[in-house]
Amino acid sequence: LAFKASSVVAPGRFFGSFSHSRVTMAADSSRFQDVAMAPPDPILGVSDAFRADTHPDKLNLGVGAYRTEDLQPYVLRVVTKAEKLMLDNHENKEYLPIEGLAAFNKATVELLLGAGNQAVKDGRVATVQGLSGTGSLRLGAAFIQRYLPGATVYISAPTWGNHKAIFSDAGVEWKEYRYYDPKTVGLDYDGMLEDIKNAPDGSVILLHGCAHNPTGIDPTKEQWKVIADTIKAKNHLPFFDVAYQGFASGSLDEDAWSVRFFVESGLEVLVAQSYSKNLGLYAERIGAINAIVPTSDVATRVKSQLKRLARPMYSNPPVHGARIVANVVGDGKLFDEWREEMQGMAGRIKEVRQKLYDQLAAKDKSGKDWSFVLKQIGMFSFTGLSKTQSEHMTSKWHVYMTKDGRISLAGLPAAKCEYLADAIIDSYYNVK
């Protein structure tokens, strides 16, 4: 390539042609200048505000993370033992396959459906290790977007704060079905069924396997049976979010009942799992996406496409949490110890729930029925407080919670139940 002499500029002349102000402007400008500030996360932002508060009675009931009576994070003893096994075995840090650790995948599907489940025996379950519940839901959403084009996902109103964003970012349309009845602070069962019936045939129905977040309100087994029949009649695809197996009731089998019933009813089912709560592996980001389908051939092809979607997202999943789960579930002694610890955590939450109800019932002389607190299950309680009342809980009482009235009982010590009851009663009656 030949250059004309006149096209070459001497270095001094080149730099001398720019003023200091123009250089400064260039340094300050950005192609991202018009990017707006994102709003704080409605759940994680609660913890940021809590940390900035210096009041001695402050309570963080916003984030769903288990705490001891002394409000300390809890590392399960069985997790520590599983990690010691990893050190003793000199486990390496090599890449996992795209679908994840084989021992984990085997353990997680058997934990979900039961080792003797016919779908497991027949090889009709496609399982891919995911990045906890969120990542597994996101992978499932991407699969829906690609292989069920035009399908709408129906999400309960209300639901976990991240569900809508997960499907929106995957390019999947979502709508809501009725779930919560503010008049009874209970399940709007008739409204739920009506909306599922009215959804276009072949829609995706997102369901909470147990301990519905944020309400803590679950259908009864008889209601689940009717919901399954309605979904089958409409040729809908149920997509379960199972974030609390074993952590809600203290029983792994009881908390998996709804999923197992749907599978045994012959429905195709998607299930996202998380081990953040029941093993306390919040930071390990360990979970799975499962597709239970009619034949092993379909399962093989579905798994291949889930892997194809995962590859450009994150290539392959992390190994540490997967080995912890595989070691705990795969060792009979550790598994029994885990169940005992889970029952202990679930039991503490049940005790706190009972004590909060006792305080509310004793302090409220109006005759209001607070029994909905006891009817709810899991780590959350839906108080029925409005946004304004929830904000009052924070501004006056320093109780940090989500604006929809949800509180995390997993972060409530028994010693603070009376204080919380005073805050709820004050906010309920004195704030419109």
Image: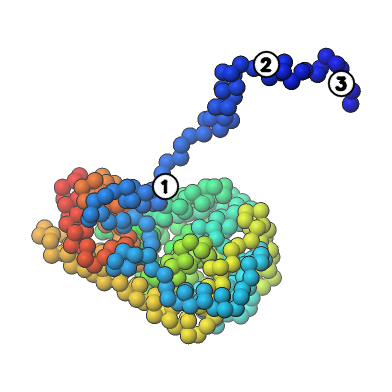
Expressed as whole percent of the image width and height from the top left, the position of residue 160 reads: 41, 55
**Rendered position, 112 above or below 31:** below
Quarter-wise, where is residue 341 in the image? Answer: bottom left
Tell me the crowding category of disc 3: few under 14, some 14 to 19, or many 20 or more residues within 10 angstroms, Cα based: few
| In the image: residue 417, left or right of residue 325 | left
| Amino acid residing under circle 2 | Gly
Foreground residue among 89 and 206: 89
Residue 280 lies in quadrant = bottom left
The secondary element bearing badge 2 is classed as helix
How busy is the neighbourhood of tag 1: few (under 14 within 10 Å), some, or many (20 plus)? few
Within 10 Å of the Cα at label 2, are there few (<14), some (14-19), or many (20+) other Cα atoms? few
Give the residue type that dot 1 points to. Asp
Identify the residue at horizontal 43%, vertical 63% (top origin): 208
Residue at the extreme right:
2
Dot 1: element:
loop
Q: Mark 1 — residue?
A: 41
Q: What residue sits right under mark 2 in the picture?
A: 16
Q: Earlier in the sequence, mark 1 or mark 3?
A: 3
Tell me where residue 256 appears, x and y as whole percent. 45, 73
**Label 2 to label 1: alpha-carbon separation:** 48 Å
Q: Quadrant of residue 97 in the image?
A: bottom right
Question: Residue shown at 42%/79% (left/top)?
Answer: 339
Identify the secondary structure beneath mark 3.
loop
Number of the label disc, if any, that sits on residue 3: 3
Quick one: which residue is furthest to the bottom in this view?
333
Query: Is residue 155 shown left or right of residue 16?
Result: left
Q: Position of residue 197 (x, y in %)?
A: 45, 58
Residue at image coords 34%, 65%: 72
Q: Is residue 176 visible?
A: yes
**Upstream in the sequence, badge 3 or badge 2?**
3
